[in-house]
Image (spheres, helix red, strand yellow):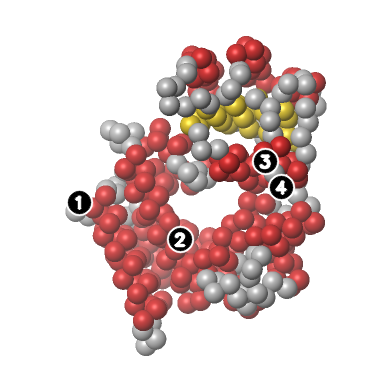
């Protein structure tokens, strides 16, 4: 059964098949639908990849054949699927009664055996996720900025232009707006500076370098990059987000097996960030992370309570202190 993605965005409960395949070029839409599935279900959720299942098929067969004393149903999410998993799915189909299996793939062409199998089946579900257009991106912006003042056509056009109709980029820009405009009053001039992608990528480089404890590179970047005063709340929020994520990883990891644990984090770490994230996890511990978070908290208090301070100088000091802390043993 083929489902319309726009209907599922409105009501994910319309998806009643036990096994469903999501595929397409719109990775942002696939990610949004996956989040809705997770948020809509409070039962056990198991996350796997196709490679993990192919290496050990017992993983998934054991899950669907094992009943829990505490849960009547479980959800299994399988990422990065292709035609290679088709035979396993065909074996699983007769076994599925209560559990739900959701598969996620990139673009599958018409010759794909996996896609054809799902499209012809009356029992399975398939959700094509096509690229967004101007209309769909406008709707996302309007829906997520509902309740904000200053959402003019000029604001919407700026967000569309900066995103290039990429839903992931749009969601990132909207997240910045929620962090920065806490009074829910959007000012176009400030928004224009906030969504300056070059400035953001430069700060990300500084943040990643500092959290790795790379003193020379961090100093070099700080001397060549102009940090914008208006964005300091966003910069601090970005640092805090990474510190808390590192703390979560360390608390969940057993025997410091970070590579395995990272896949269970919610929301997930973007694949491009995983390498930096794992490098940072190896040099941070609970004590150092707590100290760093205390430093960011103190900076936030100073910024909000004192108008006579140079916020940019204090932000640079915070970054250098974090870099020094990353290098320290304790």
Q: Is residue 97 visible?
A: yes
Residue appearing at x 72%, y 67% in the figure = 156
- As helix, strand or loop, the secondary structure at mark 3 comes to helix
Mark 4 burial class by Cα count in 10 Å: few <14, some 14-19, many 20+: few
Q: Is residue 87 visible?
A: no
- Pointer 4 residue: 10
Task: Locate residue 311: give its quadrant.
Answer: bottom left
| First in residue order: circle 4 vs circle 1 | 4
| First in residue order: circle 4 vs circle 2 | 4
Cβ–Cβ under 8 Å for marks 4 and 2: no
Q: Quick check: 310 above or below 300?
A: below
- As helix, strand or loop, the secondary structure at mark 2 comes to helix
Residue appearing at x 56%, y 60% in the figure = 175
Mark 1 to mark 2 CA distance (whole Å): 24 Å
Cβ–Cβ under 8 Å for marks 1 and 3: no
Cβ–Cβ under 8 Å for marks 1 and 2: no
- Pointer 3 residue: 12
Mark 1 burial class by Cα count in 10 Å: few <14, some 14-19, many 20+: few
Mark 4 to mark 3 CA distance (whole Å): 7 Å
Numbered badge on residue 329: 1
Hey, which residue is sitting farthest bottom in the picture? 308
Q: Position of residue 148 (x, y in %)?
A: 63, 70
Mark 1 to mark 3 CA distance (whole Å): 48 Å
- Pointer 2 residue: 238
Cβ–Cβ under 8 Å for marks 4 and 1: no
| First in residue order: circle 1 vs circle 2 | 2
- As helix, strand or loop, the secondary structure at mark 4 comes to helix
Q: Quick check: 56 above or below 158?
A: above
């Amino acid at each position: 059964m083929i489902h319309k993605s726009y209907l599922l965005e409105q009501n994910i409960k319309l998806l009643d098949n036990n096994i469903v395949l999501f595929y397409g070029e719109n990775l942002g839409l696939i990610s949004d639908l996956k989040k809705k599935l997770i948020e809509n279900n409070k039962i056990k959720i198991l996350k796997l990849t196709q490679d993990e299942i192919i290496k050990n098929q017992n993983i998934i067969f054991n899950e669907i054949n094992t009943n829990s004393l505490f849960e009547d149903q479980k959800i299994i999410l399988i990422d990065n699927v292709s035609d290679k998993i088709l035979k396993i799915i065909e074996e699983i189909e007769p076994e599925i009664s209560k559990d739900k299996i959701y598969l996620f793939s990139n673009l599958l062409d018409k010759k794909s055996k996996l896609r054809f199998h799902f499209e012809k089946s009356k029992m399975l579900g398939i959700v094509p996720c096509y690229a967004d257009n101007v209309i769909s991106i406008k709707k996302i912006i309007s829906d997520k900025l509902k309740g904000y003042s200053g959402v003019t056509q000029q604001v919407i056009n700026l967000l569309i232009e900066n995103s290039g109709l990429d839903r992931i980029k749009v969601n990132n820009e909207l997240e910045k707006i929620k962090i920065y405009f806490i009074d829910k009053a959007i000012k176009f001039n400030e928004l224009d500076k906030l969504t300056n992608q070059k400035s953001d990528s430069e700060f990300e480089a500084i943040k990643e370098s500092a959290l790795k404890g790379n003193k020379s590179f961090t100093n070099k970047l700080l001397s060549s990059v102009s940090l914008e005063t208006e964005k300091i709340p966003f910069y601090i929020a970005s640092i805090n987000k990474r510190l808390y994520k590192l703390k979560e990883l360390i608390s969940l990891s057993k025997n410091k097996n970070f590579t395995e644990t990272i896949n269970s984090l919610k929301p997930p770490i973007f694949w491009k960030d995983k390498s930096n994230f794992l490098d940072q996890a190896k040099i941070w511990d609970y004590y150092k992370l707590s100290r760093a978070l205390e430093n960011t908290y103190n900076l936030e208090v100073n910024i909000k309570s004192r108008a006579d301070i140079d916020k940019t100088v204090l932000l640079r000091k915070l970054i250098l202190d974090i870099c020094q802390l990353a290098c320290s043993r304790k």
